[in-house]
Image: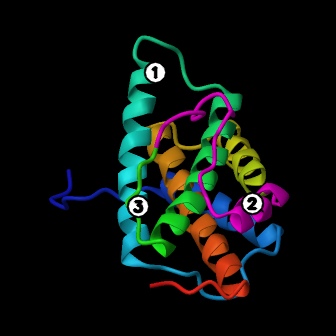
Amino acid sequence: MSNEPFSRSLAAQKSALCVVSAATELELIDGPIAVDARLAESEKKLMLKVMAAVREQKSGAQELTADEVSSMFTFVYAKAAEAVTNMANNQDDNFEMLGLFDGKIPIYAEDILTGYFKKLDFPTVCARKFWAYYEEGLDQSDPALALFESLKWCFRLSCHLAVRCLEEHNYRFI
């Protein structure tokens, strides 16, 4: 047994690469990704709420279905647009969990982002790539860790897309 406080997870790394691969395949990454401390806080807040919802959903139940996993990717994608809108308008995040598992996800974002995000297939490709990786035998020691790593990267890259979209429309961030 190691004295190191952290473990190293190839499954988490590979699941994050599924999301990066989806963005690359769709030609959505054109340079460094936009980052901001406020978006990192948004990510933390959202992921904690999603983790709690998954724990509640799975208590006494079987594993998440492919449809539920797909919905989760679309959910964090929509919440990224919401987080960037909140950041741009200097508002606090109030992430509601509506639609997390059923695909009926409300999006509270700038109209320009809502329209742009509805045109992209990014969360669907992320979910498909993650599910394929999961099905081909991802390290089953902690599949939840791998899923959440993918969801985090989906959120991060979606935030990048939202920031880039608003910047292209001359939106000024405070």
Which quarter of the picture shows residue 63? top right
Of all residues, the one furthest to the top in this rendering is 60
- Is residue 105 within the magenta segment? yes
Residue at image coords 19%, 61%: 4
Q: Position of residue 161 (x, y in %)?
A: 67, 72
Location of mark 2 (residue): 117
Q: Amino acid at mark 2?
A: Phe
Q: Earlier in the sequence, mark 3 or mark 2?
A: 3
Q: Are marks 3 and 1 in contact (CB under 8 Å)?
A: no
- Is residue 152 within the magenta segment? no
Q: Are marks 1 and 2 in contact (CB under 8 Å)?
A: no
Q: Is residue 142 visible?
A: no
Kind of element beneath mark 1: helix
Which quarter of the picture shows residue 20? bottom right
Residue at image coords 58%, 68%: 159
Above or below residue 83? Residue 173 is below
Location of mark 3 (residue): 42
Kind of element beneath mark 3: helix
Kind of element beneath mark 2: helix
Q: Position of residue 97 (x, y in %)?
A: 49, 36
Magenta extent: 96-121
Q: Amino acid at mark 3?
A: Ser
